Structures are given as structure tokens and as C-alpha cells.
Amino acid sequence: MSLDGLRAWIGVVERKLTMRTRVFLVLVAIAIGGAGAALYLAIDVQNNSISKADLESAQSGAGTASLEEEVTTLKAEVADLRGEEVGSGGIPESGLEGGSSGSGQTPTPAQAEQLQKLLEQAEAQKGK
């Protein structure tokens, strides 16, 4: 073989090796990017997942008693604002629809509207 033939053969091998190196580097970059995306998604799923304790507390309904207590307290506050007696269930005896209260005071339209909103909020919280 001649020296020129060997130089040409080495040039071809070098070009193939350069091309393979470039392809390999691109594949490595894609693999690293994919691994980084997988790690990010795994961490995000773990942070946003519901734990067993969360499920157990939701199933036990432990928050229901506190919400019912809060609704009763809000109804008592509404009754106090109107100056009424509170019945056994925590509901004012005359209700909000009656125009006058037990003490002879008539709430203004603004007060009646505010009382109605408070009652609706209490019922909404009880329903949750």
C-alpha cells in the first residue's frame, strides 16, 4: 500500500469517528435532558400527592364537628345582633324572616341584609 492510500484511509476513519462522536454527544445531551425532566416531574408529583394521613383525616370527618360548632356560634352571633333568644338547636326562635325581634327592635334593611349574608355563609360552611 502506498502512503497516500493510508493517509486517505486514515482521513475516512477520522471523519467517521468525528461524526460518531458528535452523534454520541447529542444523544448524551438528550438523555441528560430527559433524566432532568423525569426528576422534575417525579418531585412535582411527590409534592402534590395526597398522603395516607390526609386521606384518613378526610375519611374520618374530624373537621365536621368543628364546622358544626362554628355554624352554631355564627347563628348565636346573628341572634345576638338581632337581640333574640336562641332556641335549643342554635337557631333563633323567630327566624330571620320575621320583621321584628323579641326585644321590640326592628333591624334596618342594611342590618337585615348583613344578617342574611351571615346566615348564608354559616349554612354554606356547614354544607362543606
Image: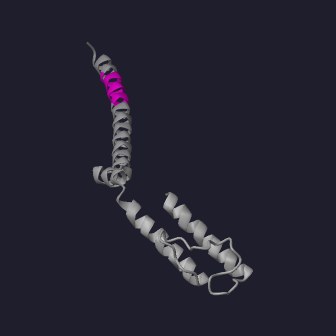
Name the outermost residue toward the left.
1
The vertical placement of 44 against 117, above or below, is: above
- The residue positioned 60% from the left and 66% from the top of the image is 120
Image quadrant where residue 118 sits:
bottom right
Instruction: Answer left or right for 63 relative to 123.
Output: left
- The residue positioned 37% from the left and 31% from the top of the image is 23
The vertical placement of 116 against 82, above or below, is: above
> Foreground residue, 101 or 67?
101
Rendered location of residue 70, percent (x, y): 45, 70
Image quadrant where residue 84 sits:
bottom right
Rendered location of residue 94, percent (x, y): 62, 73
- The residue positioned 30% from the left and 51% from the top of the image is 56
* Magenta: main secondary structure: helix
Rendered location of residue 114, percent (x, y): 65, 76
Rendered location of residue 5, percent (x, y): 31, 17
- What is the quadrant of the N terminus in the image? top left
> Foreground residue, 65 or 106?
106
Magenta highlight range: 10-20
Question: Residue 29: within the magenta?
Answer: no
- The residue positioned 59% from the left and 84% from the top of the image is 83
How many labels sit on residues?
Answer: 0
Question: Residue 15: within the magenta?
Answer: yes
